[in-house]
Image: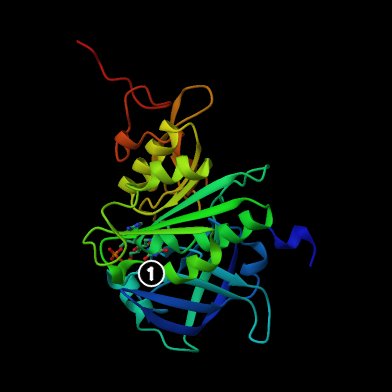
Amino acid sequence: MTSATTRGPIQVDGEVFSNKRVGAYQHLTLVADGIAERTRPGNFVALAVGGATSANLLRRSFSIYRVRPAGVYGGTVEIVFAASGAGTQWLADRQPHDAINVVGPLGRPFALPKEPVACALVGGGYGSAPLFALAEKLRERSCAVHMVLGASTESRLFGALEARRAAQSVTVTTLDGSVGIKGLVTDPLPALMARHSIEVVYSCGPMGMLAAATRVATDQGAWSQTAVEEAMACGIGVCMTCVLPVVGDDGVTRMLRSCVEGPVFAGDKVRWDAVGTIPAGTFGAPEVSRQ
Ligand SMILES: Cc1cc2nc3c(=O)[nH]c(=O)nc-3n(C[C@H](O)[C@H](O)[C@H](O)COP(=O)(O)OP(=O)(O)OC[C@H]3O[C@@H](n4cnc5c(N)ncnc54)[C@H](O)[C@@H]3O)c2cc1C
Ligand code: FES
């Protein structure tokens, strides 16, 4: 296959290979030929849910955990998800050989450092899943990888064992103290960054966690890359459901679409305190009258 045919998203009639419970999550592996070759760490897939006659018209978005290029069963793509609403519950009920339509890979991936620097990878809950493919790419570039994984409780931690193979050091936190350090995933980050001279902080998880990880990185003069999870409808840049305020190099705030201009953003460019709003002065926003 040429590089021209392995770029950009495709739509594939996928088939469930396996669907297993892992703690509080489901680990779903789909045979979906052609996605693996196109995927870079930080990309996501949008899955059709509910079957052909379903009223759930919107696809559901999931970070890509792992991909394997074509093998005996064809190329596979893996996701880890929490069954919360109608769409994810439907996915959790799928059995091997069931059909699921897949669009992907979507979105911008994590940017990788050019130099072999030390990196901290911070994951909250299922947000840890996309960090493993990233860790592999960073190791290929001789970067030191340190993982900090957190969750509310042990069953909501993802990948703590796998992290031992993927990283030079692993720190685990839980809010209830059921395993690891009791507290937030960002609590041990400042000391870890100082100890290992961390220059880049990658994070994926809830918005509050991303804002906190960015704050710690910026305070210590490190670069930050965050994978956001804004609610999405189309996933392909046409509906503007997923916008959030991001400051450009010219200092101007613009509402960027996290499905195409993200989901990975430089953390220090996102206006975390204004997510969910259109802050005053945003490019293209109506002027508020001052009478
Ligand atoms: C880029 C991206 C990556 C994601 N990665 C994962 C992942 O790896 N694992 C995982 O469990 N979940 C992930 N999510 C969240 C996942 O998309 C939602 O949990 C899912 O859409 C909920 O669908 P539902 O039908 O079960 O719930 P419902 O609440 O019935 O969903 C209805 C609609 O609300 C929106 N929605 C609801 N909750 C969310 C949410 N938290 N984020 C975004 N949209 C939401 C969706 O657009 C969906 O169409 C990701 C979301 C995005 C945008
Ligand atoms: S989800 Fe439609 S523009 Fe991003």
Q: What residue type is labelled 1?
A: Phe
Relative to 282, say whether 209 is above or below: below
Query: Farthest top residue?
Result: 291
Which residue occupies 51% across, 64% down?
64
Q: In this view, does 258 lie above or below 20?
A: above
Residue at which label 1 appears: 81
| Residue 133 image offset from top left, x and y in percent | 57, 62
How many dots with numbers?
A: 1
Query: For this view, does 71 lie left or right of residue 60?
Result: right
Q: Residue 235: in sight, yes or no?
A: no
Is the CB–ligand 1 distance for label 1 below 8 Å?
yes
State the residue in front, 153 or 59.
153
Left or right: residue 83 compared with residue 263: left
Q: In this view, does 32 lie above or below 139?
A: below
Label 1: element kind? strand
Could you tell me residue 48's position as x and y percent? 44, 71
Q: Which residue is drawn at 63% across and 77% down?
A: 75
Q: Quadrant of the N terminus?
A: bottom right
* Mark 1, other Cα within 10 Å: few <14 / some 14–19 / many ≥20: many
Residue in view at x 50 percent, y 28 percent: 248
